[in-house]
Image: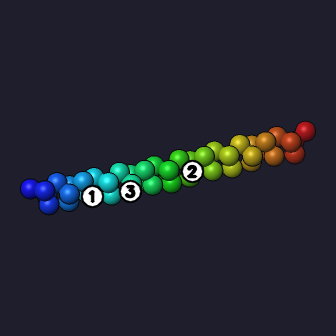
Amino acid sequence: MAQYLEASKQASKQASKQASKQASKQASKQASKQASKQASKQASKQAKV
């Protein structure tokens, strides 16, 4: 039983780490996309004026 608990604890730790890594990657990708979009919008607005 103790072994099972240990394995379960490990798996949970791994899954949590994985999920956190993924979420962070996604958020970073999102932010970068947004920033790029904003910058491009700004630049085009500037060029027009």
Which of 34/14 is in front? 14
Q: Is residue 29 above or below residue 42?
A: below
Label 3 element class: helix
Residue shown at the point (53%, 47%) measured from the top left: 27
The amino acid at mark 1 is Gln
Label 1 element class: helix
The label on residue 27 is none
Q: Give the percent coordinates (x, y) of residue 10.
A: 27, 58
The first of marks 2 and 3 along the sequence is 3
Instruction: Estimate how packed mark 1 is, as few (under 14), some (14 to 19) or many (20 or more) residues with alpha carbons within 10 Å.
Output: few
Instruction: Estimate how packed mark 2 is, as few (under 14), some (14 to 19) or many (20 or more) residues with alpha carbons within 10 Å.
Output: few
Q: Which residue position holds label 1?
A: 10
Which of 47/21 is in front? 21
Between tags 1 and 2, which lies in front?
Answer: 1
Q: Cα distance, mark 2 to mark 3?
A: 15 Å
The amino acid at mark 2 is Ser
Between tags 2 and 3, which lies in front?
Answer: 3
| Picture quarter with the C terminus | top right
Label 2 element class: helix
Q: Cα distance, mark 1 to mark 2?
A: 27 Å
Q: Which residue position holds label 3?
A: 18
**In the current view of this chain or complex, which residue is farthest to the front?**
2
